[in-house]
Structure formats: structure tokens, C-alpha cells
Amino acid sequence: MKGNVVFDLDGTLIDSAPDIQGIANRLLLARGLEPIDLATARGFIGQGAPSFITQLRHARGLPESEQPPLLEEFLASYDHAVAMTHPYPGVRAALARLAETDRLGVCTNKPLRPSLAVLRHLKLDGVFAAVLGGDSLPVRKPDPRPLLATFAQMGTGPEIYVGDSETDAETAQRAEVPFVLFTRGYRKTPVADLPHAAAFDDFSDLPEIVNEVMGRQAERAAVVRGSCCN
């Protein structure tokens, strides 16, 4: 039976922080404010564009009244912020291997249009059966509904969520889906403190990890079926 493997996007499949930092700094410089460094930009990523702008405002002491125009300007540039974004090493090969046996999807808090734009730019869009962005539903991760909606578009089978952050770990936990943690992304919490079924720092290891985690799911399901029939 085919399984369903859903990925977070920023910090998991792609390192988009340099482009996002670039947008943020253009907004700040237009207002005569100091730019943010790359580490700060990475720390702001993960809970969607409105949250990013809120954190940016707080970092530079901008009032709440600046939220709507900043967010509007940020989103206007987001579709084209792809020049410095790249997949993490090994992503293409891992996705190609996984696609031979499983269905693949993306569930991200990045808005849908820029998500699709960067996937097209990187020529990664053809491999995914479903892509949900942070504005695809009225709620965002860590609410589990976006992840569950992504799986619902992909068909039945064992389910795994692959992400890099605290938000992703909480989303998977609330959706009751095994979480596989990419340790080189944008997380701020030690690996040991995040609930996960497996962790990896090299995408060449991911297909085997997915196989092992899905195998454990199948074993548990068999035990449950056996206990129900006895």
C-alpha cells in the first residue's frame, strides 16, 4: 500500500531565509530602520507571514498600525523572492526515491502563491500530489487541520509528516501523525526536547527512515486488528 509523506517547506525542503531576509530588510530600510541579520530572519520564520511581520515590528519598535501596510508590501514581493532560495542537499534525489513508492505533499504556513512559485522555480512542483499553504484554510499550523486536509487530498495509506520546527512537531502531535524531524532547519529547541519518531540531518537517509516508520505503523495496525478480532 502506498503511504503519504507530507513535508513542511521553509527550513525543511528549502532554505528560503536569505530571500525572506531580503524582503524584510527592504521594508525596514524604506522606513529608515536597521536591517535584520540572517539568523534573526530564520528565527522569525515558521508561523506564517503575519507572524513574521509581527515579530519584525517588535524587533524594530514599530507600532501595530504598521502591521497591515508592512504585511501587504511583504506579500507583494513574496511571489518573486526566489533568487537566493535553494533546496537542501539531497532533497531532489530523496523526493525522487520516495515518489517511487509513496504519495508526496506539502503543508506549509507560507502563503500558497509564493509556495507554488518557489516550487515551480526550483522545478520541484511536479512531484507533489497536494500543496496547502498558510492561507489555504482559515487556520494555520500548529492547528492540525491544514495537515489533515493535505492528507485527505492524497488518498488512504500510512501517514508521515516531515518538518524542521517546533510548530511542525506540535502540528504532527495534534494530528496524531508520526513526525520525522529534519535537524538542519530553523528550529530553536534542542532535538531531544521535540517529540519525533525519527530525526535526520542528511536527506539521503530519509527514504529508509520513512520505510522504517511506516513499517512500525503497519505493525501497530496489525496488532490493533488482531486484538479486535480475538
Image (tube, rainbow, N blue to C red):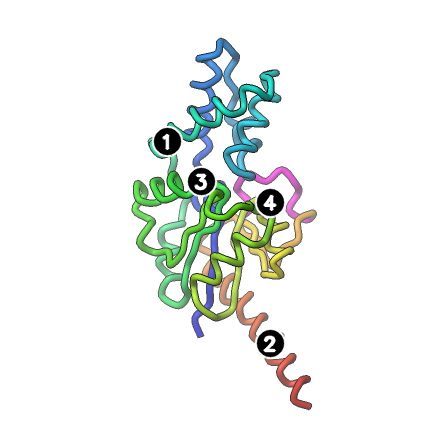
Residue located 59% across and 61% down the image: 177
Disc on res. 167? 4
Secondary element under disc 1, as helix, strand or loop, is: loop
Magenta residues, dominant SS class: loop
Q: Which mark is in front, 2 or 3? A: 3
Q: Mark 1 points at which residue?
A: 81
Looking at the picture, tell me which residue is in the foreground, 202 or 76.
76
Question: First in sequence: mark 4 or mark 1?
Answer: 1
For marks 2 and 4, the one nearer the N-term is 4
> As shown in the figure, which amino acid type bears the numbered disc 3?
Pro
Question: What residue type is disc 4 on?
Answer: Thr
Q: How far apart are marks 3 and 1 (CA)?
A: 13 Å
The residue under label 2 is 221
The disc labelled 1 sits on which kind of residue? Ala
Q: Distance between the residues labelled 2 and 4?
A: 27 Å
Instruction: Let me know if residue 46 is in the magenta part.
Output: no
SS under mark 3: loop
Residue 190 - label: none
Say whether marks 2 and 1 touch (CB < 8 Å): no
